[in-house]
Amino acid sequence: MTVENAMIRSDAAVLIVDDEPGMCWALGHILKGSGIVSVTATSGQEALRLAERQRFRLAFVDAKLPDAEGLELARRMREADPGIRIVLVSGYFYGDDPEVLQATAAGVINGFVSKPFLHDEVRTIARAALAP
Amino acid sequence: MDMVDRRGSRAATGHGAGEAERYEKLYAMLLDAIPSSVLLIDAQLHVVSANRNFLEKARLTESDTLGQRIDAVFPPLILDHMDLARRVRKAFELNEPTRGERMTYRAPGLTTRVYYYSLIPFAWRGTVEHVMLLLEDVTEQMRLGEEARRAERHVASVVESASDLVLSTDVDGRILTWNAAAERVSGYTRDEVRGRLFSEQCSAPHRALVQQEFARARSGREFGTAEWDLVTKPGALVPVAWVGSAMKDDLGRVVAIVVVGRDLTERRKLEAQLLQSQKLAALGVLAGGIAHEIRNPLAISSSAAQFLLEDPDAPEFRRECAAQVQAGIRRASVIIENLLRFARPGARTDVEPLDLASVVRDAAALVVNQAKIQQINMVVELPPDPVRVSGVLSVLQQVFMNLLLNAVDAMPAGGVLRVGVARAGIEGQVRITDTGHGIPAGEMDKVFDPFYTTRPVGQGTGLGLSICYSIVKQHFGAIEVESVEGQGSTFTVRLPLL
């Protein structure tokens, strides 16, 4: 998805960052089912460009991107916008992985979803993050 | 003898007394100059002349000796041993010389000496006047001869006792000698192989190479090192590492070829075990990347299935979900298949025709998962047609896996990993280039050494590249490295095309 598209979808509240088009498809449809609009980025660079132009309340970030580590991207996104909620989505880490626990404790990420996941997990996280 | 004759004849024809004295002096000088003992003995067994050599050896003076009977001059032991009196008498009777008899004598307080002696009758006008006893001290020659024989026996026993195979051939490669280790390893005795071509003792696929090396040695060039299988008497193959050298004569002509071989059976067993543990280690490294790669399609399939369970209305979306489920499962199973191809323990261990491109493609397919999670962009360039080589699939897989994982390791902060397979003349060539930390110029010649590693203790055995080197060598290939520190490395593997 390009920056131009993102501008059109400026009402989006959620950013999905994953280099797997299938993952973007799945997460996008789950959120759409709950009436939440999202935009997707398939690289760290693209995610940062989108976050510069638009404020997101929530981001689902893949742990391993072709050009960046998910945790490093989360750090940079939080620097730019301390209020954003970031959830790491990964097939590489596991829930009680020391790196994940450390990043959560340090406030780099607000949650972790392990692939494959149940749709309810994603919906619960999204609703909590977007609750007024 | 001539001089005695001449002196006798001149004196007899009535030259002056001065002339006789002159010959006497010359005769005495010549006798004394001879490095042997010379005595003249008359028919009554009296010594009538003894040269300086004899007097010195016997520690006698002229007056002790001249005019004495031989039993007063020689110790009884020698007289008995030589049976001197009887022999002298016989020489007088028969007028026939005895030559080259050997005698060993040890004087009290002195070392044993060995003499050759001859008894030569001197006859004048049909009558034997004197018998000349010539004693030659050959102790020193005997000692040197014995020493040479001992040195020869020693060298022979060194060769015999060597645990390595030691053999020699003539310039045509026909076996001349074959030591005990060669007999033990091959099962052939030296008599069975003597005269046979050495190349015929090697396995058929190696014969041409053996002949090639022998031709090189024959022309005086360096004989390389090589690994050729030896065919044993029962028909088994024994891997042997050979080193040869030409034996040259004083004029520099090649007269024989010496070949030394080391039985590699034990080393091969260890290498096989090492290879297996390397494989397991590689699987450990690959596990992270594979887990990540498999869980993506699983997550997509799982989501698609959950959408279907939620019973969506739109038929188009239902079809999309079903397609996602199927695609995800297919992707996961391809990854598992790649893993199986590499890990299956029952893989064939014999040499077979292989497509180098597909061996590299399979290894790259596994490593790409690991590369991805390290932000490494992998570029694989394969030719459209197969690159046919002969090799053992499972071990060649390991070579490329080691090289690819090393490249991934060299780029902890990401980079580009290029993998290319191409034909280059009579060779198939695989180039693996990374943009990693590179190898310092001073360490380039060490990278293929066993136990060379740049990793901290416990994180690498330093055996990966030495195993690659050994495997490629066994496939009659070559492996090379080019590197610029801080910019990256290129490893090139060349294998002969089929």
Image (tube, coloured by chain):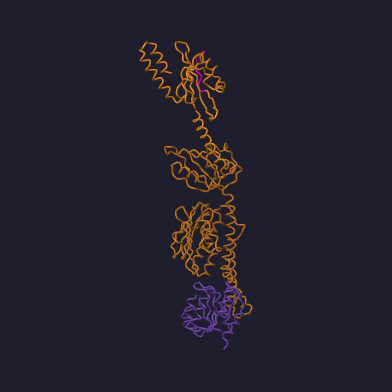
Chain colours: A purple, B orange
Q: Residue B336 at what x, y percent from top left?
A: 59, 65
Is residue B284 in sight in this rendering? yes
Q: Is residue B221 left or right of residue B455?
A: left
Q: Residue A109 at what x, y percent from top left?
A: 55, 79
Is residue B322 in sight in this rendering? no
Q: Residue B343 at what x, y percent from top left?
A: 59, 61
Relative to B277, does residue A96 appear above or below in the rendering? Answer: below
Q: Residue B140 or B271: which is nearer the viewer?
A: B140
Q: Quadrant of the N terminus of chain B?
A: top left
Quarter of the view holding residue B104:
top right
In this rendering, the count of numbered labels is 0
Q: Residue furthest bottom?
A: A132
Q: Residue B309 or B498: which is nearer the viewer?
A: B498
| Start-end of magenta stretch | B93-100
Q: Residue furthest front?
A: B63
Is B298 magenta? The answer is no
Q: Residue B398 at what x, y percent from top left?
A: 55, 59
Relative to A119, does residue B149 appear above or below in the rendering? Answer: above
Q: Residue A3 or B235: which is nearer the viewer?
A: B235
